[in-house]
Amino acid sequence: MYNSVVIGILARTWKMLRGIYRYSALRRIRDFIVIGFKRLSKGSKVVELLTSDRNLIEEGLIYELYCRGVDWVNGLINTIEIGMDNILKGSLVYNLMHSLFGYGRNLQVTISIFSVILGVGIMAINLARGIGAYEYYILPIIFIMITIAGCKTSYKDVLDGSFVFNFIRNIFIIDEGVDQWW
């Protein structure tokens, strides 16, 4: 019925609990209290204000002023961004930063190269200090191996091909072809 095992178990548990609750003493006590409060609050302006469908926050003056302020700041930032893009198109530093960090794959390669250089640097510093114990080199070597693997493949592609990742993701995916139980 459901693509997700967890959702299927939760749906069956919910149906069972709903059947048990329908004829319980707890429901009768709750209904007695709710009916009492409804009778007491009939005609109350405070209860009407708190339970109305009107959204008091969005209709308020302070909220309107806040929205206008945020919209003005966003417009100002967008104007500055457009102006800076036009000015910085010929900048060597801007083009270098945009090519290094502009897109997801470029960012991944840049971070991987930085990590390799960092690992090699740690190892060089340890060698220069005369530290010969192998435990000081295990972490940088593992770090370098992981980042070299990151340069060759996209992490997204690795996760999409992973059985464990897909299994965990499918636990929480709801099959949209069935009726919703909630």
Image (cartoon, helix red, strand yellow):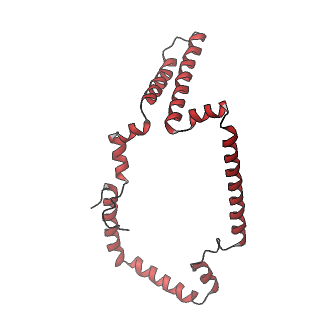
Q: Position of residue 8 (x, y in %)?
A: 31, 60
Quarter placement of the N terminus: bottom left
Give the image quarter of residue 71: bottom right
Q: Nearer the viewer, residue 8 or 67?
A: 67
Say which quarter of the image contains residue 3. bottom left
Residue 137 position, x and y percent, is: 50, 18
Q: Looking at the picture, does residue 119 appear above or below residue 54?
A: above
Residue nearest the viewer, comparing 37 with 112: 112
Q: Determine whether 144 is above or below 63 in the image.
A: above
Percent x, y of residue 50? 60, 78
Left or right of residue 126, residue 64 in this image: right
Would residue 52 be found to the left or right of residue 170 on screen? right
Residue at x-position 51% and y-position 39%: 104
* Residue located 53% across and 89% down the image: 39
Q: Nearer the viewer, residue 31 or 117?
A: 117
Instruction: Specify the quadrant that holds the C terminus.
Output: bottom left
Q: Residue furthest left?
A: 1
**Percent position of residue 123, x then y:** 54, 16
